[in-house]
Amino acid sequence: MERKAIACAAVLALVVGVAWGKDDVMGRAKGIFKPIPGKAKALKGNPATPAKVELGKMLYFDPRLSSSHLISCNTCHNVGLAGADLQETAIGHGWQKGPRNSPTVLNAVYNIAQFWDGRAEDLAAQAKGPVQASVEMNNKPENLVATLKSIPGYQPLFRKAFPGEKDPVTFDNVAKAIEVFEATLVTPGAPFDRYLSGNRKALTATEEKGLALFLDKGCVACHSGINVGGTGYFPFGVKESPGPEIRPEGDTGRFKVTNTAADKYVFRSPSLRNAAITMPYFHSGKVWALKDAVKVMGSAQLGISLTDDDAGKITAFLGSLTGKQPKVMHPVLPPNSDTTPRPLTN
Ligand code: HEC
Ligand code: HEC
């Protein structure tokens, strides 16, 4: 029985090997990447309804989630700027500079876990972080709930989004509503997705050569799946440590989450979708040109020095990962009442 299975596997490998001749770039790519699904991903324990998505959108844009009433999720994850902020590292409460670059929220629902170090398991767990972080929104859950309860327009929206709950205005529900909204922030229809669906002409010859290099040089070991990344944790500096100007020594990444020596300078591989428009790069945000980031990856992760020409082709391929950007109409937010806590400006 077992021997038969092994024989079968060998035949299969042979067939696949032949079918995936080295030149069959499309065939190989289809086995490794997936297009962005047409339908929003269903979230565990948090079913999406139109009312919940709409509430989540309002909360995402509402700066009253922050203690200053100035900073919303959209400040650092601007849906008009590919879900990012074009800053090296995030600027938050009181103009404080945070330690890490704001990753895009677009397609984040397809990442294995959230944050550069994967410390939040999903988008709902993630959303509670920035509200409370002193360098981001600097708020307290109790103060946020009191603020939302003081805004009369929010009551019916929470009731509609969480029907049957006696007291639906809670911090948990804020996070849940934001999560279902974020799950709609996806970018299907990139040239690469059309290519994966069988349209060879969707990529230019240069982009397809870049894809072949991406596969052959080994980038694909850490950047695969729906998001062309976001799938696992890897040391930043497998072969060669990047200098402290790119990988600051103080940020040891996943080591702070797991306290395991092997996790020093380990980070989640980022999704490369929309990378061409979400500069600057890396958790430090220190590299502004995508081609330079590609070269850093070559030396740090693969121990190779990519030629300018090869790096250019790979960069062209990465450009084919830019999808249709979500068009989000800015919501009208319900006004304060006399009992709404005043903004804290320090
Ligand atoms: C002051 C800027 C700032 C604000 C405000 C902010 N974020 Fe972020 N966000 C960041 C930074 C920086 C990170 C990365 C932090 C890390 O990895 O340690 C991040 C990470 C994320 C991620 C993880 C993405 C990924 O691929 O890992 C999501 C999702 C996200 N934020 C959503 C939100 C939501 C929702 C809000 C509002 C409740 C919000 N953020 C408010 C700066 C901000
Ligand atoms: C061993 C795993 C691994 C390999 C191989 C690898 N990467 Fe990465 N990549 C990562 C990790 C981890 C990061 C995040 C590094 C950080 O900022 O801490 C990253 C970051 C990036 C970024 C920056 C994205 C952003 O939004 O900041 C780009 C671009 C990138 N990789 C492209 C490539 C290319 C092109 C190759 C092949 C030449 C490659 N990677 C090979 C793991 C890998």
Image (tube, helix red, strand yellow):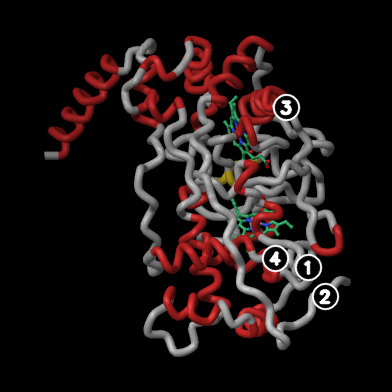
Q: What residue sits right under mark 3 in the picture?
A: 289
**Residue 170: % across, % down:** 55, 81
Q: Earlier in the sequence, mark 4 or mark 3?
A: 4
Q: Nearer the viewer, mark 4 or mark 3?
A: 4
The residue type indicated by label 3 comes to: Ala
Q: Nearer the viewer, mark 2 or mark 1?
A: 2
The residue type indicated by label 1 comes to: Ser
The residue type indicated by label 4 comes to: Pro
Q: Label for residue 344?
A: 2
Question: Contact, CB < 8 Å: mark 2 with mark 1?
Answer: no
Local SS, label 4: helix
**Residue 247: % across, % down:** 77, 40
Q: In terms of depth relative to the viewer, which is nearer, 249 or 278?
A: 278
Tell me the distance, in whole angstroms, between the alpha carbons under discs 2 and 4: 12 Å
73 left or right of 92 in image: left
Local packing at callout 4 (Cα closer than 10 Å; few below 14, some 14-19, many 20+) is some
**Residue 304: % across, % down:** 65, 19
Q: Earlier in the sequence, mark 1 or mark 3?
A: 1
Q: What residue sits right under mark 4 in the picture?
A: 63
Q: What residue sits right under mark 1 in the picture?
A: 134
> Ligand 1 near label 2 (Cβ, under 8 Å)?
no
Q: In terms of depth relative to the viewer, which is nearer, 328 or 99?
A: 328
218 left or right of 199 in image: right
Q: Earlier in the sequence, mark 2 or mark 1?
A: 1
Q: Earlier in the sequence, mark 2 or mark 3?
A: 3
Question: Residue 25's quadrant in the figure?
Answer: top left
Question: Contact, CB < 8 Å: mark 1 with mark 3?
Answer: no
Question: Residue 66's quadrant in the figure?
Answer: bottom right
**Residue 119: % across, % down:** 60, 59
Question: Residue 45's quadrant in the figure?
Answer: bottom left
